[in-house]
Image (tube, rainbow, N blue to C red):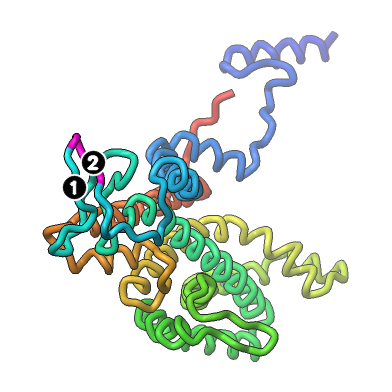
Amino acid sequence: MASEAAIGTDRDGAEASGFPAGPDLVHPGIGPYRLAWRRLLRNRVALFFGGLFILIVVLCLLAPVYANDIAHTGPNVNHITDVVKVNGKSEEVVSSTGLPIGPTWQGRFLLGADKNGRDVAVRLLYGGRNSLEVGAIATLITMVLAVIVGLLAGYFRGFTDGVLSRLMDIIWAYPALLLGVALGVMLAVSGINLGLFELRGGSLLIPALIVGVVYIPYVAKPIRGQVLGLREREFIDAARVQGLGNLRIMLGEILPNLASTIIVFVPLMLANSILLEASLSFLGAGVQAPNSSWGTMISDGTRYIPAAIHLVLVPGLMLVAAVLGVNVFGDGVRDALDPRARIRIER
């Protein structure tokens, strides 16, 4: 009887305090990534810009469909002597003075043509595929190598940390753009031949490799600092007592605790890689002809300002939209993963 009265009292007190009685009195815990996902879903600005970037990616992936079924031309097909009808009038794709046609807002030459009579819209989509491919591969190279370097330097410290940190300092000492231009000029045309590993000049993997290597210290140093703190924690000591080796501790104990940092760095590095590739291509040290990218299109279009300013505006706006979309979405991901952020949990 006394226990039943106590239970009744507890239920009455729970109901009076506004909390549910019985099994629902204690809410189950919510994992950090599920909580971060809820935060991200409530950040509509980040979701909008993330959707904008995804839209750009989808449009670039559909470049062959647009080129074959709508524009009926390829990215490198010249139409210097062609004539198209715009609003019932015949216009030359490239005039006798060498001025390319502007946007027609129809299937062919939707965004105009360049100096060789090539469809700007088609080249924009194909160039976007190259820019995004280089950026994605460069981000993968940066993240993989930076995580390996940061883990080894932070965990083993001593001689290993000294050697790896000095190598990172050598790359860190040069501005990313200047180092990229120096490597690009040297490797873009001649290529890379290391015996078993060979990349011919003009390959998209060359600018991707250059950009990926240039940004390694920008990720490796923060990861190293975080590993230095994690290796002194109690759960690492417990893992050593259990007899776990260094490799298992790094991969099974430390690496999962770096997941949030790695996730935050991915969109940031992707945006920086796309932007650096565009800068290198603009200066002639990135993507090489006949391949196109947003940077090469901007470089070619600068010669026709202001008569054909669309040659610069179109790839420039696409580049800004892609980089802005990744950056804003990355900021949203960072805020969502911030443990200090507050969110109202609703059932």
Q: Main secondary structure of the magenta part?
A: strand
Which quadrant is the N terminus positioned in? top right
Q: In the rendered view, does 187 fall on the left or right side of 304?
A: right
**The stretch drawn in magenta includes residue 86:** yes
Which type of secondary structure does the marked residue at label 1 adopt? strand
Q: Label 2 neighbourhood size at 10 Å, few (<14), some (14-19), many (20+)? A: few
Q: Residue furthest right?
A: 243
Q: Does the residue at mark 1 contact the one at mark 2 (Cβ under 8 Å)?
A: yes
Residue on which disc 1 sits: 91
User: Quick check: can you spot residue 217?
Assistant: no
Which quadrant is the C terminus positioned in? top right
Q: In the rendered view, does 96 fall on the left or right side of 129?
A: left
Q: Label 1 neighbourhood size at 10 Å, few (<14), some (14-19), many (20+)? A: some
Look at label 2 and name its amino acid.
Answer: Lys
The quarter of the picture where residue 258 lies is bottom right
Image location (x, y in percent) of residue 199: 58, 80
Residue depicted at 41% across the width and 57% down the height = 75
Image location (x, y in percent) of residue 56: 42, 47
Q: Is residue 168 above or below residue 81?
A: below
User: Quick check: can you spot residue 1?
Assistant: yes
Q: Is residue 273 above or below residue 260?
A: below
**The stretch drawn in magenta includes residue 308:** no
Q: Which residues are magenta?
A: 84-88
Front residue of 61/291: it is 291
Front residue of 262/104: it is 104
Residue on which disc 2 sits: 85
Residue depicted at 46% across the width and 41% down the height = 69
